[in-house]
Amino acid sequence: MNNYHLTPSNLGYFVFNATDLPAWKTFLQDIIGLQVGSKSNNQALVLRIDSQEQRILIQQSDNDDLAAIGWELDSEESLDALAIHVESQGVDIQAADSDFCSTRAVEKAYICTDPNGVNHELYFGAAVAPMSESFKSSVMKGEFLAERFGAGHYVAIAEDKDDTNHFYRDVLCLRLSDYIRGEIAPGGPVLDATFMHTKTGRHHSAAFAALPFPKKLHHFMLQVEDMNDVGLACQRCKDADIPFFMELGHHPNDQMFSFYVATPGGFGLEIGWGGLIIEEGNWEVKTYSQPSDWGHQQGAH
Ligand SMILES: [Fe+2]
């Protein structure tokens, strides 16, 4: 099915449920280097990584997991067209009210739910912070790679590969990037992951795999522009005794140099540099046999 005209522009925001907002604030602001946004309060923590007012919303909850993914469309027309398409595929989709849109700092949104219980919020018109409040990290050397490429990527846990594949590709109209099918470590469990991209071409915005993991989300990824910021963040995590999922390493498919740590929510955060940007029409889908071509050793914790 070629629905490229309906494909979202980028993954614009993450929404997480959290039981411990202060722990998240320390982790993301002081250790990783994000900026706390002005709309934060004692029920919600808003974080910035670029010129937009919010890229991550962490809402006080009784659980710690992914709540929603925000997919940006460039115009109201393209947003409405995708919403009509989602409904035509037999998936229930609702228009969000203005109160909801203000919690997401967007003009207009629709909400639908995937086969794994994750909400997908399609939107346009994200709020931009005033020029006088340009993004500032208290600890990073450089900046995050975001703006038109969106917030980052995530890997979801998918129990039913076929249903999930159908939802991401035929309903949300994401584009196939590649696959990794192989042993995570020699003799260990086999990974079978599918990677998908949006129009602006970050190698993948979404991926899914059937991993033995007790969350809807395995990890989300934020990309930095200066390679030194991977090493510096890695060192800050070690100094703060943050548990590591995987040490520094390199992925063969998106060419990302990265490490993975446990967030206060129990799922992972990957900090990466060097991820490929896909040019549509000039991309060959491949299947890789290993998740990492070097490093990414499982954490000792
Ligand atoms: Fe990743």
Image (spheres, rainbow, N blue to C red):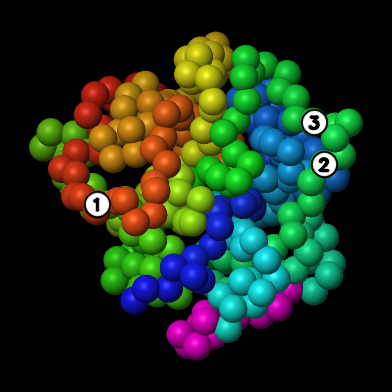
Residue 48 seen from this side? yes
Name the mark nearer the viewer: 3 or 1: 1
- Distance (Cα) linking label 3 and label 1: 38 Å
Q: Are marks 1 and 2 in contact (CB under 8 Å)?
A: no
Q: Are marks 2 and 3 in contact (CB under 8 Å)?
A: yes
Q: Which mark is residue 154?
A: none
Instruction: Estimate the x, y position of residue 272 in percent, counting from the top left.
Output: 46, 29
Q: Residues within 10 Å of mark 3 (few under 14, many from 20)?
A: some
The residue type indicated by label 2 comes to: Ala
* Residue 106, above or below 110: above
**In percent of the image, x 75 and y 68: which residue is there?**
108
- Distance (Cα) linking label 1 and label 2: 38 Å
**In percent of the image, x 68 and y 30: which residue is there?**
34
**In percent of the image, x 32 and y 24: which residue is there?**
249
**In percent of the image, x 79 and y 51: which residue is there?**
127
The region drawn magenta spans 85-96
Residue 300, magenta (yes or no): no
Q: Going from the N terminus, do you reach mark 1 or mark 2 first?
A: 2
Say which residue label 2 marks. 129
Name the mark nearer the viewer: 1 or 2: 1
